[in-house]
Amino acid sequence: PTIIIGSDIPGISGEALAQAARLLGGHDAVLGPASDGGYWLVGLRGLKRRAPFGQVRWSGPHALADTLAGLKDARVALTGTLDDVDTLQDWQHWQRQPPSLRLQGGRGHPADRILGD
């Protein structure tokens, strides 16, 4: 199993990573959606498909949907949504969040959404 995270996720928490690891234990893949349509985390375990990322339109609002389409035959879990920082405006938005929200790791982690069950 492998989990890769983005380096532009100021709200990431240890709990978010632990949640992803738990989810990956029972699924072929886990994705952490970003609020802009991409994702901040991808985890894969025993995936049979060779190129699930071949048709992804990167750096845009379709990246998550394209990746899910590439994983259509896999059991995929989604973690909670977090903000990533791609632009100065994103960073300024993050800085305007209340300190308590920033310290807790983003917007929290709602109940897991499981796809492919």
Image: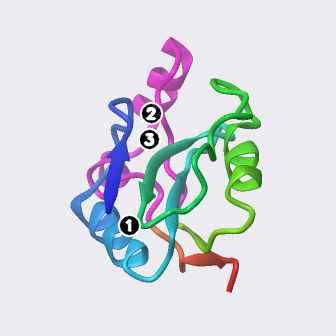
- Give amino acid for label 2: Trp
Residue 9 location, x and y as percent?
38, 38
Q: Residue shown at 71%/50% (left/top)? A: 70
Front position in the image: 78 or 86: 78
| Amino acid at dot 3 | Gln
Q: Nearer the viewer's eye, disc 1 or disc 2?
A: 1
Decide: marks 2, 3 in contact (CB < 8 A)?
yes
Quick one: SS at disc 3? loop
Q: Position of residue 46 (x, y in %)?
A: 43, 67
- Name the mark on residue 97: 3
Which color scheme did the rendering employ for the protein? Answer: rainbow
Q: In the image, is residue 86 above or below residue 47? A: above
- Other residues around mark 3 within 10 Å, as few (<14) / some (14–19) / many (≥20): few
Residue 30 percent coordinates (x, y): 50, 63
Q: Magenta segment range?
A: 79-108
94 inside magenta stretch = yes
Question: Dot 2: what SS?
Answer: helix
Confirm whether the magenta stretch covers residue 35.
Answer: no
**Relative to 112, 52 lies left or right:** right
Residue furthest to the left: 14
**33 relative to 45, above or below:** above
Per the image, the residue denoted by label 1 is 20
